Image (spheres, helix red, strand yellow):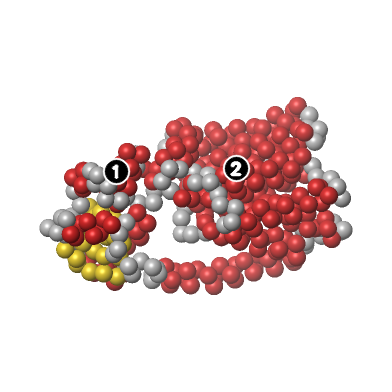
Amino acid sequence: ADAVPAIIAALAGLIGAGGSLSERPQLISFVLLAVTVGAWWKTAGDLRPRWWLAPMTWLWACSHGLWGVGVLIGLVVVAGLALDRRLDRRTMVRLLAVPALSVVAAALTPVGPRLVLTPFEVSSNAAQFVQEWQPTDARNLSAAVTLAMIALALLPWIRGTSARPWWQIALAGTAVVFTLAMMRTVPVGSIIAAPLLASSLQEQRGIPATPLTRRGTWAWIGLVTAAAILAMPIAGALAQHPSGWPEGLRPQLAAIPAKTVVLNDFTAGGWLLWAEPQLTPVIDLRSEIYSMDYIRDYIRTTDVRAGWQKFLDQTKPKYALLRAEAPLTIALQEQLKWTTMGKDADYVLLKAP
């Protein structure tokens, strides 16, 4: 698309992905997914395999678990092209070799072949306990914007004013599935939907997209470079003063001996790992590294249900970093006589007797 419809689609995609744009490795997945969607979009135009997607998948698999979505995008596009009757047998085999080699590349990472099945294990462990792994609420702003993008992209086809190739319809269907599957995959649907929307908006203009000139290319590169130069120091400065976390308790936490186990609020686990890496939180947001029984025991303890002290006997925490008004905080103070060492940002630091 030309600049105007492309910018509109990109901004819509940014809003659709906005709920998950945080300081986590999944950002790598979002960037590489956008590259992958663009690569297969070009393949749909010229039917040439992009072999470099296989080594890129190796890097992707070393970084985050959403690499399999890139493989799926390739299979969806090839299936759509087959329905469009644009592939002979030789071309289909060549194109299918790209996602096949991508899976092989993922199996050759330092983790080994078991990495291929890891995304399924992570999902099964986390879905019961983590909200972002649960079905999407269509009232969510990011999900609503993404679904609107897909609807607008397909509107000309639905109204019968413009034909849509099957590979684009297949991508749109894939975007819908990812958007509705769980909150965690709404950004995936948004990234897939962005070029569909841009293409549809361009068609509504009634003129083909103008090829980007060398001058235009350098102008965009300059804008992106300038934005990065401006953003990086700002992001670095803001990262040193995170909001909403008990920064005022850092001196007390720093004085705790290294490797001491801390009974922590679930959401504070990541902050605690970053702020005081010498300490050992009982849990953090990487729910895939804990067994389901362990997570159930943790939840029983935070809810102060029957047998809640069993988790304390198992993990043997000497300190606790919890919400000030949490049931567990009150139980530790009143029943087990833990003492308060400090309070900040709705958190309290307790010490075992």
Identity of the residue drawn at 81% across and 33% down:
85
The answer to whether mark 2 and mark 1 are in CB contact below 8 A is no
Q: Residue 70 carries which label?
A: 2
Q: Is 286 left, or right, of 313 in this rendering? A: right
Quadrant where the N terminus is found in the figure? bottom right
**Residue 270, percent from left and from top:** 36, 56
- Residue 51 in view: no
**Residue 83, percent from left and from top:** 77, 33
Task: Residue under label 1, please give it.
Answer: 297
Q: Which of 12 and 144 is in front in this view?
A: 144
Quadrant where the C terminus is found in the figure? bottom left
Tell me if mark 1 has few (under 14), some (14-19) or many (20+) residues whose alpha carbon lies within 10 angstroms of its own.
Answer: many
**Residue 216, percent from left and from top:** 74, 65
| SS state under label 1 | helix
Label 1 sits on what residue type?
Answer: Asp
Identity of the residue drawn at 64% across and 58% down:
145
Q: On screen, 51 above or below 14?
A: above
Q: Which of 150 and 55 is in front in this view?
A: 150
Q: Is 40 left, or right, of 118 in this rendering? A: right
When asked about the image quadrant of residue 177, the answer is: top right
Between discs 2 and 1, the one toward the N terminus? 2
Q: Nearer the viewer, residue 314 or 301?
A: 301
**Residue 279, percent from left and from top:** 25, 56
- Residue 103 in view: yes
Identity of the residue drawn at 86% across and 47% down:
160
Label 2 sits on what residue type?
Answer: Gly
Q: Which of marks 2 and 1 is in front?
A: 1
| SS state under label 2 | helix
Q: CA gap, disc 2 to disc 1? A: 36 Å
Identity of the residue drawn at 35% across and 66% down:
245
